Amino acid sequence: MSMELDVFVGNTTIMDMEVYQLWLDGLTVSDAVKVRMDEGALLECEANAEVLTSDTMDQFRTFQMCERLLHSPTKLGSQLLYQIPAQNQRILIERYYEFDSVFAREVLGKKLSKGTKKDLDDISCKTGITLKSCRRQFDNFKRVFKVVEELKGPLVENIQRHFLLSDTLARDYAAIVFFANSRFETGKRKLQYLSFQDFAFCAGQLISYWTVGAVDSMMEDMDVDLEKEFLHELKDLKVLVNDKDMMDQHKILVCAALRGKIKVYKLMEVNFKNLSRALINLASKLTHTKDVRDLFIDLVEKFIEPCRYDRWTVAEITLFLTHYTNAAHCLGTFRYQMIWDRYMGVIKSCILQMYHE
């Protein structure tokens, strides 16, 4: 059976973005052809399976040849081999660096090394993401980390400048870089309920308020490393639990502010000192690397689980943490308000993000 085809010659590289997504998902040509047929490509193009297979193979080959340029996105716009419209360049780059949240959750906090890469087979089976796609996503994480970890300046801006990603995606990569650098514990059973988005939000808070860059924009690694001087100063907050008079006054102020406003008031009144010690002791331990890595598991075990056991609502925790923070400013002998606000601002935001009723 003969078939007539219209042929034209041009210098613009033709790319089908739906086929591109199939390639990014790690499908083989035959699997991609089947997906396209199921989606009605034969009827849409008025072609047969042979033509569709040939087109898919050509598209895959083009993507493979462009892949090396996608490893250094800034080169894509200056190269002359492939004439790709600017809009398509942006789509190619953004989609190439997009990742599955469930995959990111599996590798979050782990060292981006060959050891972790060996686990990709298991992650692929667990998540249902193809091994090829897992490898692409892992290699992207590693590539971004290597480029930006030693750069001066804001982490998100560095990622955007070198990889031309959207603000949202760059912030997600900033979270991955930050967790890979600090090696926070994220894999324990009690943390499994937390999503990548939960951790990414917390990373954004830590980057904005606890890193060197939060106070000095000219420092190296400003958004990657937590500020050691600040972590050391957190020990001064121990006075809130070591000084009995101050702790009693703190409790009185918080109880006065919350009386009649929360259903768990009596439980809060009884457990106030335990909750306060949990928050303050966590702060005082952050000078040690291991305790920094255990920040999230400590928040869950020492504060979130007790509140969940007593059936606090998110609204009640919000009110408690707000008044707990503000009341410290009314303690006449408490002299560490700036450190206190910097600490509690992040802790409150992270707890509220991590507390799932």
Image (cartoon, rainbow, N blue to C red):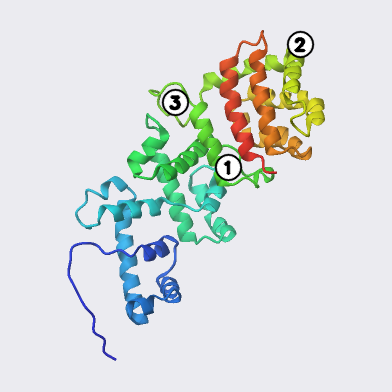
Q: Residues within 10 Å of mark 2 (few under 14, many from 20)?
A: few
The amino acid beneath tag 2 is Asp
Secondary structure, mark 3, is helix
Q: Considering depth in this image, is 196 or 142 the residue closer to the camera? A: 196
The amino acid beneath tag 3 is Gly
Give the image quarter of residue 128. Answer: bottom right
Residue ID at (47%, 25%): 214
Q: Residues within 10 Å of mark 3 (few under 14, many from 20)?
A: many
Question: Residue 59, how many percent across, how many down?
Answer: 32, 67
Secondary structure, mark 1, is helix
Q: Real-space Cα distance between discs 3 and 1?
A: 22 Å
Q: Real-space Cα distance between discs 2 and 1?
A: 37 Å
Residue ID at (73%, 26%): 258
Residue tagged 1: 198
Of pointers 3 and 1, the one earlier in the residue sequence? 1
Q: Considering depth in this image, is 24 or 261 the residue closer to the camera? A: 261
Residue tagged 2: 245
Give the image quarter of residue 84. Answer: bottom left
Above or below, 326 against 301 in this view is above
Question: Residue 173, how many percent across, how many down?
Answer: 45, 43
